[in-house]
Structure formats: structure tokens, C-alpha cells
């Protein structure tokens, strides 16, 4: 099938989708997995730039990294584009051997030089995901020496220090930074030296099981399986993702069989669907934190007592039993529960609703009569109830929070632009190690506006503590596991008292799935479209 034919097929499916809303029990096609999902956060498919959970999931099914995570054991790194690898005796060099049968959708063989070019491209562009390389000492100045391809199927990475090798492999697998792009295809669409960034906003050209054949903003996404993929061929050749923001509509669609999977549902929807014939509710704890982040560039949030007070305005368990039932469990630390080095049990949830304590803290901070601030929220099901809960409790101690609700893409743009007082949003790390979030939520290497470290929530909040920066750097370079674990433990406890965000929940991936779908496979870090069948 030619690209044009595939494109037209995808458009036809998307165009037909609205009609299905009025049809009872309209079965989805056997050759397509149809999902209803709020995907309004998508803004680009450039692996160097993406950061949203939705886009990260989609691109991980389009573009292979050198290594991947095992579906059955999310912390275990397995081969992907690289068939195997060696770590040097001094621990500073990893040599990857690429699958010689890998080709791009264009038919051109994928080589180690393509992988090296793609990694250097990410560094040159300097978007947020470049941090997955700069975290480990790679720069535009040293990349030609440290990222090399000695032959067509070998990639060598040389590091500045000795890091835990499993952490390095997890980082490589997580951030798509080793996504191998078809440099000829991408550069054919370069404009004004952008290395194809503009074209990749709505296209893909990489080694992987699927290709993006259609993205209509506010409507949907179509993926088509790549012929000639070097790995195991997807069991379902086409993935259709319909943008459906309204949770009630998602519930109706999956009840009627108009979609196979619904991804954004409220606790009431999920409770009802658990009793619905032909529908299964499935979930898995994921490394995503839901929090209120406060901007330290704007008073009163530059005062750590005010930030601490905000953490006592939330009834974590009450929300966990109602609004967040099925969706998340109370959690306050930056290191997600289950990560290596994370706090255990109640150590990770020291906060509870305490209005008296919150009032005492804002009084000590110099705001005895309270203050006014804006609170931005997105369009996910939990956004509005969490915002209203915080607003109502804040008002009881004199704080007026003005809620502004917007589409998720606009919300992320405001966050990346540091244009907010406070925001309720989520962040998901790709690394099952405390360093994954320590390096983003705690560490902020450069707090200047010019740095544009948009993939650092700490930077977005203008939060920089130089002592914490040093402690994060020391922990990741510590080779004694017991010492390193203790370093993360004390860092989490200190950060929870002074940090830029009130972490509220660690969320679950939850979906309602028709029983015609088999082998729905996911863990906290990946959803594997290739494994699903009908």
C-alpha cells in the first residue's frame, strides 16, 4: 500500500467516526484498534521535543529506541533496535550493536550513522529532551568525540563519569533520545536550518512498527503498520485514536462498541463499566505524579512557608476515595512509589488536610489576611474537581484562587512559558529510579529565561536550589547502592518541605476495553500497541 493510499484510508476512517456516535453496537473493524482518548495535548511528533504523556505513548509505538522496557517487568531493559551491547571495564563506554535488518518506512536501510545523527540533532536543537543527553555530560562541543559510529551497525557512547549502567540504559530507553530518524527524509524537509523540526510536527520518519499517516488536531490520529519492519509485525495493522474530550461520550462509545478502548473515564464511569457486559476495566500504576506547581518568580509563592501551607490545603485521602478512585493514590514525594530509591509507605505521604496549620504558615510568611492568585487547570477529568477542592479550602483561610480552565495544549504552553501563578498538572518520568524525577523536579541547572529548560518542571516554576542541584548530582554519581539510596531518602524528605510543588497523587493508567480485544499489554512505562489483537 502506498503512503497516499494509507493516508486516504486513515482519513476515511476518521471522517466516518462521528457517524458511529449515533449507531448502536457498531462494531469496529477487525483490522483496526479504535481508541477514544483526550489527545488535545499533542503539539508535535518530533522525538527531540515531545514531552506530553499522550504523544510519548504514541511515539513509543512509532519509533524504536536502542533499548526498550520489558512488558512484564518495567524496570528490565531489553534489546530493541540494538540487539546487544557491552559496558567497558571502566564503566564509561557503552557499545551498541544495531539490528542489520532495520529499515525506514521509505525502504532505506537504517544505519548507525542515522542513529548518531539523530542524537546529535537533538543536542543541536536544544529542545527539552536534549537533557536526556546533557544530564550525562554530552554537549554540542564534545558530541563528535563521544557519540560515534565506527561502522554501519555500531554506536558507541562515551560518558564523562561512571554512572549506574542500568540507569543509563533506562534513560536511553525512556526518552526516545536514541530514536533513529531517516535523516535523508527529514533533511529533505528542512526549512531555515530547523533540521526538519517543522515537518516533524505532523510527520514521522523513523525505525519502528507503525508510521503516523494522519493527525488532525482536535479530531484524531491514524497509525499504519510498517511493511518490512525488522521486528515482530503488529497484530493489528491500524490504530485509530479519536479525540474525545468528554468522558461521558467515551463511556457511551465503549458501551456501544463504537470504540475498542476508552482512556479517560471518571470513577462513576469506571464503576458502571465494571458491571457492563462485554467491557473490562483494567489498570496499572504508572510513574505519573499529579501536583499543584507554584511559580517562584511570582509572590507569594517565592516564600517557602506559603508553598508549604498549600500542601496542607488538600484532603489527599478524601479525594483518593472519591474524585481519584480508580485514578490515583495519595503520594507526596518526587520519587514515584515503586521506583528504586523511593520512600516507602507513610514516609511518602506526610501531608494531610490541616487548615489551622496552613493559616499559621501564611501568617508567619507575612500574609495573615491571605492573598489572591490564579490557578490554571486543564481538561482532564480530574482537573476541575481538584482545582475546586483546592480553591474551596484556600478560601477558608483567606486565599482567593481564580481558576482558569483551558485545553491541555494551552496549559502546557503556559507552563513552558513560565506564564502562571499556580497550575494543576501531571508529570511522568520514564525512568524507574529516583533520579528520573530528581533530575527534573528537583534539579534545575540554569534558571535563566534564556536556558529554556522546558522539560524541567523545576525550571518552569523558576525553582532552583543550588544545594539540591549538588545533592542530585552527587547521588547519581554514587556507586555504593546503600549510600545512594540514603541520599535520595533525605533529599525527598527535605524537598517535600520546601519544593515548588504540592504532589497530590500518583496515578493509574485505567482503561475500559471491549472483550473483543485480546492481549492489551501495558506497564507503568509503556503501552504496547503491537501486542494487541482482535
Image: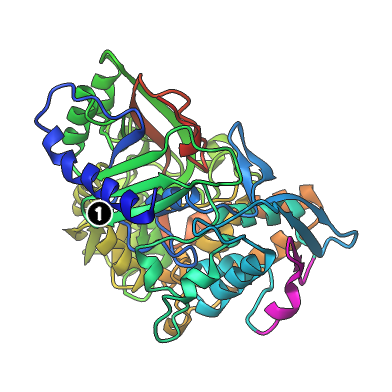
Residue 120: image quadrant is: bottom right
Spot the residue most to the left: 22
Residue sitting at x 42%, y 82%: 449
- Residue 217 is a magenta residue: no
Residue 139, placed above or below residue 506: below
Drawn side of residue 410 relative to residue 118, left or right: left
Asked whether 208 or 345 is in front, the reply is 208
The residue at which mark 1 appears reads as 378
Secondary structure at badge 1 equals loop
Q: Position of residue 127 (x, y in %)?
A: 48, 73
Q: Position of residue 381 (x, y in %)?
A: 25, 42
Q: Position of residue 306 (x, y in %)?
A: 36, 63
Residue sitting at x 71%, y 80%: 144
Residue 255 in view, yes or no = yes
Q: Which residues are magenta?
A: 141-161
Residue sitting at x 38%, y 52%: 2
Residue 259, placed above or below residue 129: above
Amino acid at each position: 500500500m502506498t503512503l497516499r493510499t494509507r493516508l486516504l484510508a486513515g482519513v476515511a476512517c476518521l471522517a466516518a467516526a462521528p457517524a458511529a456516535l449515533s449507531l448502536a453496537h457498531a462494531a469496529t473493524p477487525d483490522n483496526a484498534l479504535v481508541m477514544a482518548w483526550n489527545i488535545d495535548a499533542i503539539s508535535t511528533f518530533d522525538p527531540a521535543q515531545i514531552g506530553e504523556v499522550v504523544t510519548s505513548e504514541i511515539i513509543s509505538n512509532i519509533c524504536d529506541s536502542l533499548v526498550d522496557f520489558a512488558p512484564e517487568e518495567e524496570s528490565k531493559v531489553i534489546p530493541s533496535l540494538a540487539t546487544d551491547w557491552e559496558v567497558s571495564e571502566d564503566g564509561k563506554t557503552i557499545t551498541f550493536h544495531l539490528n542489520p535488518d532495520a529499515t525506514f518506512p521509505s525502504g532505506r536501510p537504517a544505519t548507525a550513522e542515522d542513529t548518531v545523527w539523530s542524537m546529535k540533532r537533538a543536542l543541536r536543537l536544544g529542545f527539552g529532551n536534549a537533557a536526556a543527553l546533557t544530564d550525562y555530560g554530552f554537549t554540542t562541543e564534545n558530541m563528535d568525540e563521544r557519540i560515534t559510529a565506527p561502522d554501519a551497525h555500531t554506536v558507541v557512547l562515551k560518558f564523562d563519569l561512571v554512572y549506574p549502567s542500568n540507569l543509563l540504559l533506562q534513560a536511553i530507553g525512556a526518552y526516545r533520545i536514541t530514536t533513529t530518524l531517516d535523516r535523508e527524509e527529514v533533511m529533505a524537509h528542512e526549512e531555515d536550518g530547523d533540521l526538519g523540526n517543522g515537518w516533524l510536527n505532523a510527520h514521522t520518519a523513523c525505525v519502528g512498527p507503525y508510521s503516523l499517516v494522519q493527525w488532525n488536531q482536535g479530531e484524531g490520529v491514524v497509525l499504519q503498520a510498517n511493511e518490512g519492519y525488522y521486528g515482530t509485525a503488529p497484530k493489528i495493522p491500524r490504530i485509530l485514536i479519536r479525540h474525545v474530550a468528554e468522558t461521558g461520550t467515551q463511556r457511551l462509545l465503549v458501551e456501544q462498541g463504537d470504540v475498542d478502548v476508552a482512556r479517560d473515564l471518571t470513577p462513576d464511569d469506571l464503576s458502571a463499566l465494571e458491571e457492563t457486559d462485554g467491557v473490562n476495566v483494567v489498570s496499572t500504576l504508572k510513574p505519573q505524579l499529579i501536583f499543584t506547581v507554584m511559580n517562584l518568580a511570582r509572590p507569594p509563592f517565592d516564600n517557602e512557608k506559603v508553598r508549604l501551607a498549600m500542601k496542607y490545603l488538600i484532603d489527599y485521602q478524601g479525594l483518593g476515595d472519591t474524585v481519584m478512585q480508580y485514578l490515583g493514590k495519595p503520594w507526596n514525594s518526587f520519587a514515584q512509589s515503586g521506583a528504586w530509591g523511593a520512600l516507602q509507605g507513610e514516609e511518602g505521604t506526610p501531608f494531610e488536610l490541616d487548615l489551622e496549620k496552613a493559616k499559621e504558615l501564611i501568617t508567619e510568611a507575612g500574609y495573615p489576611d491571605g492573598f489572591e492568585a490564579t490557578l490554571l487547570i486543564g481538561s482532564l477529568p480530574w482537573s476541575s474537581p481538584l482545582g475546586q477542592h483546592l480553591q474551596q479550602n484556600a478560601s477558608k483561610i483567606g486565599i482567593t484562587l481564580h481558576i482558569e480552565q483551558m485545553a491541555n495544549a494551552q496549559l502546557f504552553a503556559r507552563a513552558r512559558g513560565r506564564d502562571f501563578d499556580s497550575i494543576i498538572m501531571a508529570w511522568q518520568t520514564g525512568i524507574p529510579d529516583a533520579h528520573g524525577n530528581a533530575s527534573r523536579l528537583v534539579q534545575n541547572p540554569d534558571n535563566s529565561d534564556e536556558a529554556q529548560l522546558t522539560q524541567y518542571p523545576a525550571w518552569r516554576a523558576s525553582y532552583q536550589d543550588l544545594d539540591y542541584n549538588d545533592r542530585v548530582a552527587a547521588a547519581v554519581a554514587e556507586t555504593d547502592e546503600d549510600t545512594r539510596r540514603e541520599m535520595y531518602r533525605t533529599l525527598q524528605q527535605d524537598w517535600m518541605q520546601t519544593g515548588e510543588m504540592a504532589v497530590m497523587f500518583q496515578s493509574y493508567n485505567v482503561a475500559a476495553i471491549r472483550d473483543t480485544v485480546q492481549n492489551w499489554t501495558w506497564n507503568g512505562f509503556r503501552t504496547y500497541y503491537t501486542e494487541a489483537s482482535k
